[in-house]
Amino acid sequence: MIYVYDDYAGTHSTALAAAYHLKKLPTDRKLTKEEILNVDYFNQLTKDDFGKIFFHGIDEDGNSVYTIGRKRNKLVIPALENLCLLLEDAFHQHEKIIFSNTSPTVPLAMTFGGFFSRGLGIDFIGVPLLVLGAKQCCNDIVQVVEYTKRIGKSTNKKVVVLENKNFK
């Protein structure tokens, strides 16, 4: 199975989701600033990375975990879903693919932090806001990851798109 976490930039909530999924972060408490800033790809990607799929690792069940930043484009995930189905039919692949949107978990502090840090390059304002936002939403991201894994294990569909609108 392949898991792909998606959001606007692919460098904040998705990076945290991938780290939680791969059990690189504790789930029983709020994260520290150091833990947040040491997450792979957290606040590292640029506008040139939109639309690129980044590999984060293999989970405990042997499943691959990826992230993608789709910007505002709501067509990226449906296009990827369609491409996956086309390739599966053409090459008789039987790999289940789960796309999981982490955007609903993003608090205002993280949105503004990403804008200041990644958008404007003003880290002294953006990074503290990102850390604050990550601390605010870490429990919601953990719930999204648990839900995503549960759906992945229980569905028979080849490609699943989870919008996760109920995780705010």
Image (tube, helix red, strand yellow):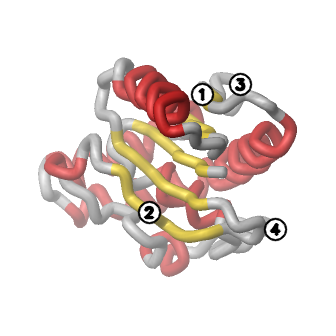
117 with respect to 162 (left or right): left
Q: CA distance from mark 4 to mark 1?
A: 27 Å
N-terminal-most mark, 3 or 4: 4
Q: Position of residue 120 (x, y in %)?
A: 13, 49
What amino acid type should be assigned to the residue bearing mark 2? Answer: Phe
Look at 48% across and 58% down and name the residue there.
15
Q: Residues within 10 Å of mark 3 (few under 14, many from 20)?
A: few
Element assignment for label 2: strand
Q: From this view, report whether residue 37 is shown above or below residue 16.
A: below
Q: From this view, report whether residue 104 is shown above or below residue 121.
A: above
N-terminal-most mark, 2 or 3: 2
Contact flag, marks 2 and 4 (Cβ < 8 Å): no
49 with respect to 21 (left or right): left
Numbered circle sitting on residue 166: 3
Q: CA distance from mark 3 to mark 4?
A: 21 Å
Look at 38% across and 58% down and name the residue there.
54
Contact flag, marks 3 and 4 (Cβ < 8 Å): no
Q: Position of residue 123 (x, y in %)?
A: 22, 63
Question: Mark 1 or mark 3, which is nearer to you?
Answer: 1
Element assignment for label 3: loop
Q: CA distance from mark 1 to mark 3?
A: 14 Å
- State the residue position of label 1: 161
What amino acid type should be assigned to the residue bearing mark 4? Answer: Asp
Numbered circle sitting on residue 28: 4
Numbered circle sitting on residue 80: none
Location of residue 83 by image quarter: top left
Q: Residues within 10 Å of mark 1 (few under 14, many from 20)?
A: some
Q: CA distance from mark 2 to mark 3?
A: 26 Å
Q: Residues within 10 Å of mark 2 (few under 14, many from 20)?
A: some
- State the residue position of label 2: 55
Location of residue 27 by image quarter: bottom right
